[in-house]
Amino acid sequence: MKTYLEMNAGPAIFQLGIPALKGLPDRLFARARSSNLLKTGSFSSLVYPDPRGELELRREIAGYLSISRNLHCFPEQVFITSGYSSGLGLALRVLGLDGKKVWMEEPGFIVTRKALELARLSVVLVPVDAEGLNVGYGIENAADAALAVVTPGQQAPLGSTLSLRRRLQLLEWAVSSDAWIIEDDYLGELQLEGRAAPALASLDEGKRVIHIGTLSKTMSPGLRLGFVVAPAELTTPFSEVAATLAPAPSPVVQLATAQFMRDGHYIRRVRRLKRLYSAQRDALCEQLRMRNTEWIKAGLAILLRLPDGAPDVQIAREAMNFGMAPSPLSAWFATPAWALPGLLLGVATAPEPHLATSCCRLFEIIDRYC
């Protein structure tokens, strides 16, 4: 966890988890925010806001998900949070699975793993391959698990998409075992290879999937906005927990975001980001092709393979001195015996004018260690 926090102190070149350094279209969002200050004026400020989130934003998110993620839901199923971690905490409180087993991707997001441990769940590490989470391994080793947490759209950090075969197998296991699935849809529609894979929850006829999304990757992490889509049967317990332990963030920010989406700015921004990220990824790939190195595309990152035993954490720390923040692959593993060395280079924070210089400096550092 310490390494994760250290590597996310940016913004910096190659940093994961944040949008393009150009940032949010400030003027448009400021205009939306100003116009919505009137809606939360003197009378409204004397009334406690809906802990589930502002209805206007929940409607916009429900509509957007039906188009972009093929996930059809009612606004009553949408709960506004202050980001992914907040949504995960809300879901774990609702499920109340203290002491039960949970499948966790290996490698996987360290924040998720830490949250599951703090919720006093017994984490069962399930390996990931080219088809995503190895569901068969999970069933063979912990069929009695009560929960699985997955990143099916683009596995974090390896970038693989959970195959249709594995999706159906996972959903079948959840129904037959009376288990739950938390879908971390952290990149949503921001998938650069063709049309984005639909949300896992869109296939969920058994109503076992809790879908968690965030606006951090498309808007700004500073907004602290995310959402949860709960199965219809869980809307009451989600409402109760939200009201008592995890109310939604600032109504002004929510209403401004709702207007930003309603006016069409959000979907246009997502399309612009996809074009920008594709161009930046292509430019980064071109830089890497000029060097004798092994790499693969991994979602919104390029995974740069390093020789066995290479100190990727040390390399990443030294790169920070030059304004770069590649993420060391080994830090994503919970099991040292399974850990592989490598560097994840975020493409969202890799503007083309800086690429050649940044890559030269990075490879100078790598050459000193490898």
Image: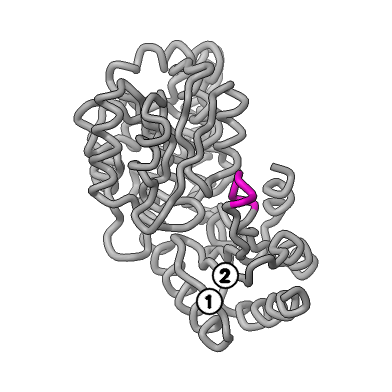
State which region is magenta: 331-337
Residue placed most toward the observer, 70 or 124: 124
Residue at the far left: name it.
205
Is residue 188 rendered magenta in the image? no
Instruction: Pinpoint residue 42: horizontal percent, then vertical percent.
Output: 55, 19
Is residue 333 rendered magenta in the image? yes
Write down the residue under mark 1: 294
The residue located at (59%, 49%) in the rendering is 333
The residue type indicated by label 1 comes to Glu
The residue located at (37%, 64%) in the rendering is 192
User: Splitting the image into 4 quarters, where does residue 262 fall?
Assistant: top left
**Dot label at residue 338:** none
- For the residue labelled by badge 2, is the local secondary structure a helix, a strand or a loop? strand
Q: Where, quadrant-wise, is the N terminus in this rendering?
A: top right
Write down the residue under mark 2: 305
Residue at the far front: name it.
140
Instruction: Pinpoint residue 331: horizontal percent, then vertical percent.
Output: 64, 52
The residue located at (55%, 37%) in the rendering is 112
Instruction: Pinpoint residue 75: horizontal percent, then vertical percent.
Output: 30, 27
Check if mark 1's residue and mark 2's residue have beta carbons within 8 Å: yes
